Amino acid sequence: MWTEKLQVQGPYNFDLVLERLSLDPLQVVDFTNRTVKVPLYIEKEPIVLQVQAMGNIDEPSFIIKGQSEVYKSKAIERLKKVFHWHQPLEGISRHFRESDLREIFEEHRGTAIVLDFDYYSCLVKCIIHQQLNLSFAHTLTERFVKTFGFQMEGAWFYPTPETTAQLQIEQLRAIQFSGRKAEYVIGLSEQIIQGRLNLDIMEKLSDQEVMDKLIKIRGIGRWTAENFLLFGLGRPNLFPKADIGIQNALKILYGLPQKPTQEEMESYSVKWAPYLSYASLYLWRSIEKRSEKK
């Protein structure tokens, strides 16, 4: 067992990060101790880290604990990107202070974009979530992982591409996948194990190059590719205009009688660049909070 303490530049509100993570029933979140268990693959080996918040929003620090010293350095580097510790949030917050999103950014000050823990699980989750309400999407994902994945040190790992590629459509339909969604998830896994899709090289590609590669795969359209860019790769300037949640958030923000058009969304978002990903996150967060209050 090893322990490492990291100091991070504020503002950083890990309690709000935990709050958003907790929307996903697969996340092992402890609000009392301000911890989350993080399942990672480092050099294809599954490891689990515990992240515990110390300090406060303006002077945040974290205690990281893990079992194997072998992967310590690489695991910490991965955590820094997953939790957005590698870039101070103050500059991003300052960018939005004079924008239409200033009140949302003040309410959720210090909320960071937290990435999915590995590229494959991010893509699978995006496919599962397509055209489903958030509650059932989380339920369906939980069934998939707990049926075909595995648990280690209390944390859940998605099934590997090798495992998923061997599944039959009927096995996924048994947990309420549609036939088409089952085909998409199995097909994606086959593409990976056959070497036709290499997720490890995605970080080196431009947004458009990643988009071009992904939308060639059956079941992956622009919405899924954009979400992978945002929550898989952590790209800073993504604004998925086809996302219903963002449309609903803008409708509420601007008091619109109906969801905004693509042209209206483009107009609203011009001043939010080059941090459109954070605009997206905070807009999602604004309607998540409304749902929690109901």
Image: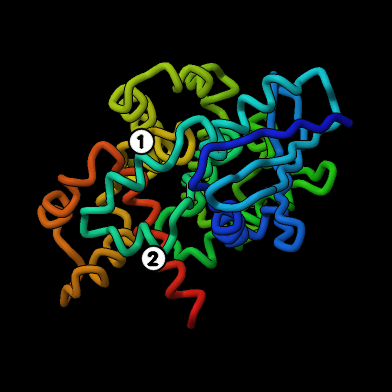
Mark 2 and mark 1: Cα distance apart in space: 19 Å
Q: Nearer the viewer, residue 285 or 7?
A: 7
* Residue at point 12%, 57% (across, down): 264
Q: Which residue is mark 1?
A: 236
- In the picture, the disc for residue 267 is none
Q: Nearer the viewer, residue 123 or 4?
A: 4
For badge 2, the amino acid type reads Ser
Residue 218 image position (x, y, % from top left): 40, 36
Answer few, some or many: residues within 10 Å of disc 1's Cα (few below 14, many 20 plus, some between 14 and 19).
Answer: some
Residue 72 located left or right of residue 15 = right
Residue 248 image position (x, y, % from top left): 29, 67
Looking at the image, residue 29 lies above or below residue 208 = below
Looking at the image, residue 145 lies above or below residue 66 = below
Q: Which residue is mark 2?
A: 286
Answer yes or no: is residue 219 visible: no
Q: Nearer the viewer, residue 124 or 105?
A: 105
Q: How is the image coloured?
A: rainbow
Answer few, some or many: residues within 10 Å of disc 2's Cα (few below 14, many 20 plus, some between 14 and 19).
Answer: many
Residue 112 located left or right of residue 1 = left
User: How many marks on residues?
Assistant: 2
For badge 1, the amino acid type reads Pro
**SS label for mark 2:** helix
* Residue at point 35%, 42% (across, down): 92
Residue 32 image position (x, y, % from top left): 75, 63
* Residue at point 30%, 37% (across, down): 237
* Residue at point 40%, 42% (across, down): 90
